[in-house]
Image (cartoon, rainbow, N blue to C red):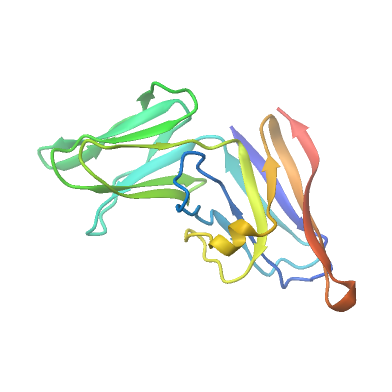
């Protein structure tokens, strides 16, 4: 199911604020930074930016030579395996895993590490690098997005630790088919206020 979102800028900062949206892998290590799923730039006051947030994901693998496998659709509670073939390797179709809350990817190759890439709406959202033969990597995402004002953040690149440590807002999306993400605050000088993000006009599934 797709959740249709609309980011609306009602702040006093005009189009100057850059906004980053990301998800957190609950099972990530402490030093593992999330990736910027979407970066919104130059959205003026009272303007909006539409977003589509699918509840399912896609997974692909890549290697040190820059080769990528076709993407496979996957949902929470499923796993995929990378297996050898006479012509190389193959990322198989999703099957049920032993945990209903996790996405699992297994490197079943006899040799050769792979990178595991997770996509949502065609955009890179998470990555595990150098997954060795016989290893399994696990992703677990809550049905939420995190949003923050940041600068010099590139889409699909790691969100800096400074952004993670700063004020960012968790947006729970479970049970909705659409919602508006409204940004207020901002400004300059003595009238400046912190940026605030709220959900409005939520429609239930």
33 on left or right of 17: left
Position in image of residue 184 (x %, y %): 82, 59
| Of the pair 90 and 33, the residue shown nearer to us | 33
| Of the pair 192 and 19, the residue shown nearer to us | 192
Position in image of residue 124 (x %, y %): 46, 52
User: In the rendered picture of this protein, how many numbered marks are placed on residues?
Assistant: 0
Residue at image point 26% right, 37% down: 135
Q: Say if 77 sits above or below 125 in the image.
A: above
| Of the pair 115 and 6, the residue shown nearer to us | 115
Q: Say if 170 sits above or below 97 in the image.
A: below
115 on left or right of 55: left
Position in image of residue 60 (x %, y %): 35, 44
Report the quarter where the N terminus lies: top right
Residue at image point 25% right, 53% down: 63
Report the quarter where the C terminus lies: top right
Residue at image point 52% right, 66% down: 154
Give the image quarter of residue 64: bottom left
72 on left or right of 163: left
Position in image of residue 92 (x %, y %): 28, 32
**Which residue, as the protein is rendered here, is positioned at the far front?**
30
21 on left or right of 87: right
**Which residue, as the protein is rendered here, is positioned at the far left?**
86
**Which residue, as the protein is rendered here, is positioned at the far bottom?**
189
Q: Say if 13 sits above or below 203 in the image.
A: below
């Amino acid at each position: 199911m797709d959740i249709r979102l609309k980011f609306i800028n009602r702040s006093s900062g005009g189009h100057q604020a850059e906004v980053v949206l990301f998800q957190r892998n609950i099972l990530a290590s402490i030093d593992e930074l999330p990736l910027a799923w979407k970066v919104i730039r130059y959205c003026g006051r009272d303007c909006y930016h539409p977003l589509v947030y699918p509840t399912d994901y896609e997974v692909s693998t890549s290697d040190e030579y820059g080769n990528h496998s076709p993407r496979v659709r996957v949902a929470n509670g499923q796993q995929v395996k990378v297996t050898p073939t006479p012509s190389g390797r193959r990322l198989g179709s999703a099957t049920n895993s032993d945990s209903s809350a996790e996405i699992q990817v297994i490197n079943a190759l006899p040799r050769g590490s792979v990178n595991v890439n997770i996509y949502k709406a065609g955009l890179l959202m998470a990555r595990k690098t150098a997954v060795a033969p016989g290893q399994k990597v696990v992703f677990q995402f809550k049905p939420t997005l995190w949003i923050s004002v940041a600068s010099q953040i590139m889409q699909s690149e790691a969100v800096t630790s400074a952004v993670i440590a700063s004020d960012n807002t968790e947006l729970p999306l479970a049970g909705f088919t659409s919602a508006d993400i409204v940004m207020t605050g901002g400004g300059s000088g003595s009238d400046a206020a912190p940026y605030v993000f709220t959900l409005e006009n939520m429609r239930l599934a």
